[in-house]
Amino acid sequence: MNKRAFFVIIFFVYLHIGFASGIDSLALKPKPVYGKEARVVSYILDNNHYRKIRLSDSLSAVILNQYITELDNSKTYFLASDIKSFDRYKFSLDDLIRNENVSPAYEIYDVFVKRYKERMDYVTNVLIKQEFDYTVDEYYEMDREKEPWSATQNQLNDVWRKIIKSQALSLRLAGKKQPEIQSTLKVRYDRFTKFFTQFNSEDVFSIYMNAITGAYDPHTNYLSPKQSDLFKQQMSLSLEGIGAQLQSENDYVKVVRILPGGDAERSGKVNVNDLITAVAQGKDGEMVDVVGWRLDDVVKLIKGTKGTTVRLTILPAKTGVNGPSIEVTLVRDKIKLEDQAAKKDVINYKANEKNMKLGVISLPSFYMDYEAYQKGDPDFRSTTRDVKKLIGELKAEGIDGIVMDLRNNGGGSLPEAVDLTGLFIKEGPVVQVRNSGGKVEVLPDDDKEVFYAGPMVVLTNRFSASASEIFAGAIQDYQRGVVVGESTYGKGTVQTVLDLNRFINEKEKVGELKITFQKFYRVTGSSTQHKGVRPDINLPSAYDAEHYGESASPNALPWDVINPASFQKSQQVNKSIVDALNLSYLDRTKFDKSLKKYISDTEQLKKNLSETQVSLNETKRKAEIKEAEKIKSDEKLDTKVTSKEGLPIDELLQLNDEYLREGLLILGDLVKRRIG
């Protein structure tokens, strides 16, 4: 598992390009305009980035390290001697960039090309023709971040021997014979070579520029003209596919987010952290092995015309890289604003002879149809408008409380986060925003109306970010509701996109710069950066902050505090209520079979995510697969009797979502305490 986890979840960012370039082609050279772009970007960052740090010798060292890492994040191409030779640029990149000189990027890349060719020659001429001894008790370490660079070709050969042996063993355990294994590996690495020849000068420059911008913070990025176009397509939600966002991790493509409205979500068979190993077209198309492919090439296979079928071979996160693969059939669809919109549900709940109706509002993002708004359309869609309408319908149905489900909500419109908070509080500040000059602006809710004043739970997880954290933090600070779940992502920064064509007078089109220029603070003065919003009631989590969230990036902006804003707490939730809800939850962990299984499953997932060694012994690998299959077969649970006091034996038991079920149980407890 790659523990760098920069968590950039847009399709076109190359997080691992150790298999893409041009082997026997002429060395790539920078275009003259690239130097100008680099200089302009460095000037903008020096003067406008929130961090207020200047391009310097120390930052030069960070840029060099990031660039090397982006080229070879698994330490499987460069030798230690190469890394030492690159030290000549360690304290000079800043001066070269200001002088419009980006040649070091291409000189380092030329060395990478040489090493890549050596590796492919060794793999294709030696390793894939070899029949391995699978009785040897040895392992391959997938997380090579802390591994040293290989000092000799022989050391690197042994690393690659283990890589190919692991891939061959996976194919062997899938039922392939030796000739088929060799054929599959040959096709795989021939394709790597083909990808290699397609890499161009713009790709090299883009990686180098993102090493520069990433030295400031992980959300400041350079978008090449090609990447900018893809980004705009993605933001317009016009792409057709399965509804999942992907990123490269080592030789795999990993699912990092499930988009609402896509077939990945509807099927229930694709989950965050699943690894995609093969893709097939239609119901009968041949599975194409995609281990080691470039991310955008895998995405091209998965995307397609609405209504068509694509099949994926997946290593589920639940059983890990040592578990069995599964095949999932999905139908491509177009993700539209409608699919991203808020939705409601009503759950009937009965406990201790008390009948309740609990409302659930699922909110995938904070959205606003700016185009319709600017055209003066009185019916333009927005998060606040839609949620207000849904709450009105829930109130008409006589609901006793509401769960606001913000799981996997990556944010969106800041004004919508403020306006949505206003539906639940009387008036007052919602969030504070500080710019790079230190000026603080308070964004308030000016509407004195409280549209919904009843019991409320806000459900969050590790992937609730940005605007979600503003809303959850405000509800918690105002003591308006109870936050339940996991600590949120910890993204407390604001970005804007600058078109570099405004600063460079060239006929040739240049890229764009996404730059961090503001920071969020809660009304208490605490930043949401790094720490996120910590829930009042913690549910089990498989995702630790060190590897998932803002804290996973070493260059993330720090957490800090500013002066609090003046605000009036609602007192609908207090410490004694939260303590009582926690005691009730902890009591359920002792006797509720469904909750106990969820805790056990979460611990298993956490263990799988932390596992970085793959056994190269066939007997051990078979045993691991057998154990993973046993875990999978134990998924079904008889929940007819779930509590010593008769916990709900109605619609809550029908939920195939223990996380939501717990949120509803806690909401039910909150309703009973407010009634009492």
Image (cartoon, rainbow, N blue to C red):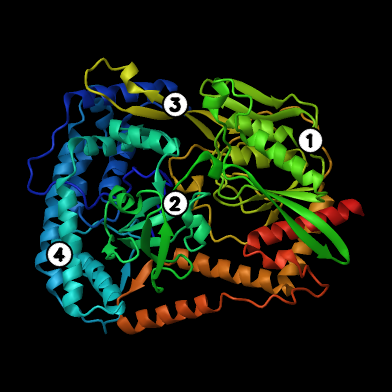
Answer few, some or many: residues within 10 Å of disc 4's Cα (few below 14, many 20 plus, some between 14 and 19).
many
Query: Residue 244 shows which numbered tag?
Result: 2
* Residue 236, horizontal then vertical, whole percent: 44, 35
Q: Between label 3 and label 4, give the one nearer the viewer.
A: 4
Q: In which quarter of the image is residue 602?
A: bottom right
Q: Earlier in the sequence, mark 2 or mark 1?
A: 2
Which quadrant is the N terminus positioned in? bottom left
Answer few, some or many: residues within 10 Å of disc 2's Cα (few below 14, many 20 plus, some between 14 and 19).
many
The amino acid type found where label 4 is placed reads Val
Answer few, some or many: residues within 10 Å of disc 3's Cα (few below 14, many 20 plus, some between 14 and 19).
many
SS category of the residue bearing label 4: helix
Query: Residue 123 shows which numbered tag?
Result: 4
Would residue 224 be seen by someone viewing this image from the given angle? yes
Q: Between label 1 and label 3, give the one nearer the viewer.
A: 1
* Residue 331, horizontal then vertical, whole percent: 42, 56
The amino acid type found where label 3 is placed reads His
Q: Which of marks 3 and 4 is nearer the N terminus?
A: 3
The amino acid type found where label 2 is placed reads Ala
Task: Identify residue for label 1.
Answer: 451
The residue shown at (43%, 40%) is 555
SS category of the residue bearing label 2: strand
Marks 2/1 in contact by CB < 8 Å: the verdict is no
Disc 1 versus disc 4: distance between alpha carbons? Answer: 65 Å
Disc 2 versus disc 1: distance between alpha carbons? Answer: 34 Å
Marks 1/4 in contact by CB < 8 Å: the verdict is no
Task: Identify residue for label 3.
Answer: 49
Disc 1 versus disc 3: distance between alpha carbons? Answer: 39 Å
Q: Which of marks 1 and 3 is nearer the N terminus?
A: 3
